[in-house]
């Protein structure tokens, strides 16, 4: 990960000081969506017009070790595929987890840096909500579960309309207590036997799902909430213990 990411303060990430005013109504809103909360490195340019969401261009690579390396090139490639430049954007949406510390930080730092440089508002979205926005519920409640490593899952519960009713949480699969038997996300696929659930699509958050999850705030031109990561637990890395002092006899 680059020094520019590692030096950002923990907690809320600064966004642009002078955010651009969104264009709403009959005009479309052009959004860059970024997510690095899962092994997928996702960036896409999405056009939002009322309830209509169209992905103009996106890039997705599943590589849990390449978030910092790929997220900026993916954002640029998505804009090129959409036939626009970053200066044409109206807003940025960033998945804020829950997710592992290092990968999640890469996407959020990139979104914050782009928002600051371009003068764009940056909207945080729970990555599980973004996954839920792409689920075809079939009239039933469902879960969203992503791999939290350490043999655990990040999870949340949703009603048939995709509204979150519980979570997010981080637990061992055997400790998740629920009567819901359908679950989206890579965590559901990895731990299907222990969870006793039927895995359903999608596996990872999409650019369109991120924009759907942020849609009402985008269309209302609401000020974005602070870009605060949802870690749910402490990072895997810990500071080394101070060396013990040895007193000479």
Image: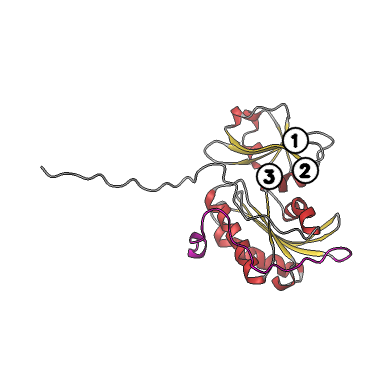
CA–CA distance between discs 2 and 3? 11 Å
The colour scheme of the drawn protein is secondary structure
Q: Main secondary structure of the magenta part?
A: loop
SS of the residue under disc 2: loop
Q: Which residue is mark 1?
A: 142
Query: Residue at position x 87%, y 63% from top?
Result: 25
Tell whether 200 sits left or right of 147. right
Relative height, residue 245 to residue 223 (above, below): above
Find numbered disc 3 in the image and state the secondary structure of the residue it sits on: helix
Tell me, yes or no, if residue 60 can be seen here: no
Q: In the image, residue 49 lies at what x, y percent?
A: 85, 60
* Residues at discs 1 and 2 in contact (Cβ within 8 Å): yes
Marking on residue 129: none
- Residue 23 magenta-drawn? yes
Residue 164 vertical position relative to residue 77 in the rendered view, above or below: above
Q: Residues within 10 Å of mark 2 (few under 14, many from 20)?
A: many
Q: Which mark is residue 128?
A: 3
Q: Quadrant of the C terminus?
A: top left
Displayed quadrant of residue 81 = bottom right
- Which residues are the magenta region? 1-27
Residue bearing mark 2: 135
- Compared to residue 12, the image places residue 158 above or below, namely above
Percent from the top left, x then y, of residue 62?
62, 52
Image quadrant of residue 18?
bottom right
Residue at left 63%, top 29%?
176
Closer to the chain start, of discs 3 and 1, is 3
């Amino acid at each position: 990960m680059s020094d520019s990411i590692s030096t950002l303060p923990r907690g809320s990430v600064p966004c642009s000081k002078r955010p651009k005013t969104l264009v709403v109504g009959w005009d479309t809103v052009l959004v860059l969506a970024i997510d690095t909360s899962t092994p997928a490195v996702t960036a896409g340019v999405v056009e939002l017009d009322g309830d209509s969401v169209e992905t103009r261009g996106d890039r997705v690579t599943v590589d849990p070790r390449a978030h910092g390396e790929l997220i900026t090139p993916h954002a640029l490639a998505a804009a090129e595929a959409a036939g626009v430049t970053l200066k044409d954007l109206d807003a940025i949406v960033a998945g804020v987890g829950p997710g592992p510390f290092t990968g999640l930080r890469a996407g959020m730092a990139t979104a914050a840096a782009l928002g600051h440089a371009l003068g764009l508002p940056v909207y945080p979205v729970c990555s599980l909500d973004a996954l839920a926005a792409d689920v075809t519920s079939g009239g039933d409640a469902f879960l969203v579960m992503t791999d939290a490593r350490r043999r655990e899952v990040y999870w949340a519960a949703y009603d048939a309309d995709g509204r979150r009713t519980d979570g997010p949480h981080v637990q061992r699969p055997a400790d998740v207590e629920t009567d819901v038997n359908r679950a989206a996300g890579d965590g559901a696929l990895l731990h299907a036997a222990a969870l006793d659930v039927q895995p359903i699509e999608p596996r990872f958050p999409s650019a369109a799902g991120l924009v759907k999850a942020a849609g009402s705030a985008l269309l209302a031109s609401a000020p974005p909430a602070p870009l605060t990561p949802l870690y749910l637990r402490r990072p895997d890395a810990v500071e080394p213990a101070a060396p013990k002092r040895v007193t000479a006899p």
